[in-house]
Image (cartoon, rainbow, N blue to C red):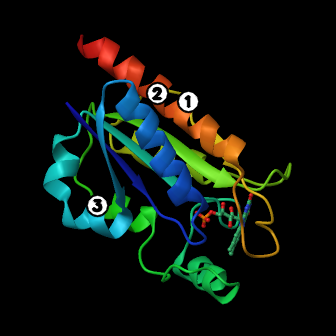
Amino acid sequence: MVAVVVFESMFGCTRAVASAIAEGMTSAGLETVVLPVDEALANDDLVARARLLVVGAPTHMRGLSTPRSRALARARGADAEPGLGVHDWLDALPGLQGRAVAVFDTRSWSRFAGSAGSRIEKLLHRRGAELVAPTQAFGVEGGDGGRATISQSQVELARVWGASVAAHVVGAYA
Ligand SMILES: Cc1cc2nc3c(=O)[nH]c(=O)nc-3n(C[C@H](O)[C@H](O)[C@H](O)COP(=O)(O)O)c2cc1C
């Protein structure tokens, strides 16, 4: 049984969270592959075979990133190329009827942060996917002004969340 975690990341926070989630999932008995969006596009067979699909993105402008917001992140010092976002990948994905999915995002701690996760949730729901866990947010530091960083405690939370999501799926197929 294989699971796939698909993410986008400009400053590396969502990448770190995605890796920790995958570690947690693997520790719970679910072999897990982590793919940035562009690699997910190139590995559509792997994505199609996955028992569980976990999707995550940074919150930009209170929702999912756009080419403009990714270019802004780049201008603010992000290492990643503005490339593709989760929205582009979801648009290119065939139907997900009955597929088990879980969603996460990264965002600032602000009350007005908005949520990339709720947007992903809506898009997945529209394609017929079934959410197996409540969407989880991970807080970043310094995100508003530019270069964002993520604390070890949030990375540890990601590991625990990944393990709990995987346990749910492994249990359902036991
Ligand atoms: C253009 C831009 C817009 C952003 N808008 C928001 C926002 O509306 N709400 C929020 O909580 N964080 C916002 N942020 C902070 C990002 O959420 C933060 O950079 C991201 O979580 C870091 O993840 P990454 O390292 O994977 O890119 C924004 C960042 C950028 C660059």
* Labelled pair 1, 2 in contact (Cβ < 8 Å): yes
Q: Please tell me whether residue 36 is drawn above or below residue 105 in the rendered image.
A: below
Lower sequence index among marks 3 and 1: 3
- Considering the image in quadrants, where does the C terminus appear? top left
Number of marks drawn: 3
**Foreground of the two, 151 or 116:** 151
Mark pair 3, 1: CA separation: 24 Å
- Crowd band around label 2 with a 10 angstrom C-alpha radius: few (<14), some (14–19), many (20+): many
The residue at the point 86 percent across, 48 percent down is: 111
Lower sequence index among marks 2 and 3: 3
- Crowd band around label 1 with a 10 angstrom C-alpha radius: few (<14), some (14–19), many (20+): some
* Three-letter residue code for mark 3: Ala
Mark pair 2, 3: CA separation: 22 Å
* Three-letter residue code for mark 2: Ala
The residue at the point 22 percent across, 53 percent down is: 94
- Crowd band around label 3 with a 10 angstrom C-alpha radius: few (<14), some (14–19), many (20+): many
The reply, left or right, for residue 6 in relation to residue 12 is left
The residue at the point 48 percent across, 33 percent down is: 162
Q: How far from the left and from the top, in percent, is residue 103? A: 49, 41
SS of the residue under disc 2: helix
* Three-letter residue code for mark 1: Val
Numbered tag placed on residue 160 in the rendering: 1
* Labelled pair 3, 1 in contact (Cβ < 8 Å): no
Residue to which mark 3 is pinned: 40
